Structures are given as structure tokens and as C-alpha cells.
Image: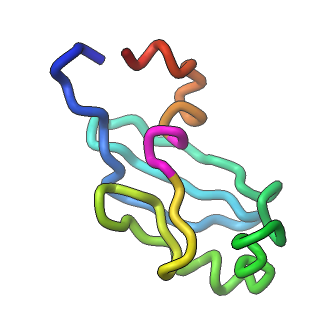
Amino acid sequence: MKRNELPPKPVEVKALEGYRLWIKYSDGVEGVVDLSDLVGKGVFALWKDYREFQKVYIGPGGAIAWGGEIDLCPDALYLRITGKGLWSRF
């Protein structure tokens, strides 16, 4: 990413079996992120009901969100999908 370039934003998100998400970004990058390790912890207790996990959407500012309680940073998920480290973005 160049200095004046904005980070890619999610354009599509889908819940998959096993508490995984498929996410597509504005730069064409797409991939799957496994979030099963979060289920039942803190605010992620909501996901114990798998139907709640399936209600994922792209929220304000591009956050990956569920209701008003849970949102995940789209940049962190992008880095997990691409396998790039934080500093490769700057």
C-alpha cells in the first residue's frame, strides 16, 4: 500500500460453517478467516447460537459486525487473510 492510498474495505461478507467468514475486499483480495476460537468468550458468547453468527454484515466504516455489540477491524482481518504483517501495510 502506498502512503496516500486508503486501505481496502470489505465489499462482501458471508458466514460459513464452523464459525468461519468469507470476506472480499475492494482491491479484489478475498479469503476465509476462522473465528471459532472466539466463540463463547466475552461478547462472543452471542455466537453460541450459530444463527447469531450468521447475521454478519458490513457496518459503518467497513467493520465486520453483528448487531450493536460486536464488530471486528477490517484491516486486522485483511492481514489475516493475506498473511501479511502489520508493517507491510505502511
Quick one: quadrant of the N terminus? top left
- Residue 31, horizontal then vertical, whole percent: 53, 42
| Residue 80 or residue 32, whichever sits in front | 80
Question: Depth check: 43 or 28 in front?
Answer: 43
The quadrant in which residue 37 appears is bottom right
Is 46 included in the stretch rendered in magenta? Answer: no
Residue 74, image x and y in percent? 44, 47
Picture residue at 56% right of the left edge, 70% below the top: 70
Q: Which residues are magenta?
A: 73-77
Residue occupying the point 22% across, 32% down: 6
Residue 55: x and y, percent? 53, 80
Vertical comparison of 34 with 59: above or below: above
Q: Name the one closer to the observer, 22 or 40.
A: 40
Hey, which residue is sitting farthest left in the picture? 4
Q: Is residue 30 above or below residue 6?
A: below
Which residue is depicted at the point 30% across and 65% down? 60
Left/right of residue 54 with respect to residue 50 in the rendered view = left
Task: Decide: is 79 above or below 13.
Answer: above
Compared across the picture, whether 28 is left or right of 45 comes to: left
At 48% from the left and 68% from the top, the residue drawn is 65
